Image (cartoon, coloured by chain):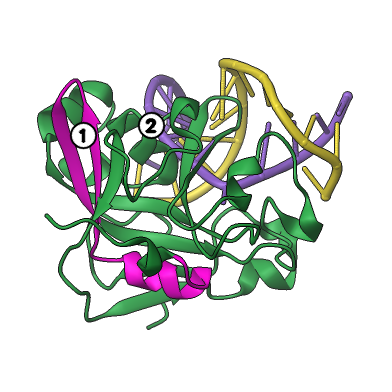
Chain colours: A green, B yellow, C purple
Amino acid sequence: LTRLPRDFLRRDSETVARALLGQRLVRVLDGQRLAGRIVETEAYLGVPDRAAHAYGGRHTARNASLYADGGTAYVYRIYGLHHCLNVVAGVEGVPVAVLLRALAPEEGIAAMRARRPAARRDAELCAGPGRLCAALGVDLALDGADLVEGEALFLEGGAPVADVVTGPRVGVDYAGEWARAPLRFAVAGDPHVSRPRPDRA
DNA sequence: CGGCCGATCAGCT
DNA sequence: GCTGATCGGCCGA
């Protein structure tokens, strides 16, 4: 139940993406804790990364949070209706981040189910970036939130993860070589990971 | 279980 | 205009 310190997040995004596996994401909604263990992430490397929203230094109203200090939340809407939550890594001015793709639900599971009636099993509640946001009630109102000191959405330390698998990032085929780079990370064999699963060890 | 399709919108990849 | 760092419902097998 100890919070992750900011320096944990002020590193390069690939390091942070690996290190976040096994840590906990906590959302406080109506005074209740909804929480889960992070089991799947993707690293976005910023300016040189064709798949990243900050590719080529792009800096707009939508992605402004990417340029904030490590530990800030970057939330954006995708396909018009879903949301994705990123943990900004690095330091202020460096637009690198880690997309949170899946959680193993631990606390407030009934509340998550109420928000996601389509989920058939607990393993599907937070298996996917849009599903995770729906289950925890994360939307654009939390864009720019402080995940280190904030009260509504924050990160807590968890158990270290021994086996990590890697694979290509999802949905970025347009990004050429960058699409195939092994920048997706998951806890090996964890049933709460989204599909398609990464394979390489 | 796998594949297709519609939903819905901000920034142009 | 077109298209995503997506999901869920519906179809057929």
**Circle 1 Cα neighbour tier, 10 Å, few/some/many (<14 / 14–19 / ≥20):** few
Do the residues marked 2 and 1 share a common chain? yes
Nearer the camera: disc 2 or disc 1: 2
Q: Is residue A152 left or right of residue A201?
A: left
SS at badge 2: loop
- The answer to whether residue A16 is above or below residue A107 is below
* Number of marks in the rendered image: 2
Q: Residue at x 24, y 70 (%)?
A: A189
- The kind of residue tagged 2 is Val
State the residue in front, A80 or A35.
A35
State the residue in front, B8 or A20.
A20
Residue A117 visible: no
Q: Residue at x 15, y 35 (%)?
A: A33
State the residue in front, A120 or A150.
A150
Sequence-earlier tag: 2 or 1: 1
The residue pinned by badge 1 equals A120
CA separation in Å, label 2 and label 1:
21 Å
Q: Is residue A65 left or right of residue A100?
A: right
Query: In the image, residue A198 lies at what x, y percent?
Result: 42, 69
Query: In the image, residue A185 lies at what x, y percent?
Result: 41, 69
Reply yes or no: does residue A45 show up in magenta.
Answer: no
Reply yes or no: does residue A26 show up in magenta.
Answer: yes
The subunit letter for the residue under badge 2 reads A
- The answer to whether residue A172 is above or below residue A7 is above
The residue pinned by badge 2 equals A138
- The kind of residue tagged 1 is Arg
Query: In the image, residue A10 lies at what x, y percent?
Result: 46, 67
**Circle 2 Cα neighbour tier, 10 Å, few/some/many (<14 / 14–19 / ≥20):** many
Query: In the image, residue A200 lies at what x, y percent?
Result: 42, 80
Q: Is residue A137 left or right of residue A11?
A: left
Which quarter of the figure is the C terminus of chain A placed in? bottom left
Tell me where the magenta segment starts and ends, as one range.
A10-37
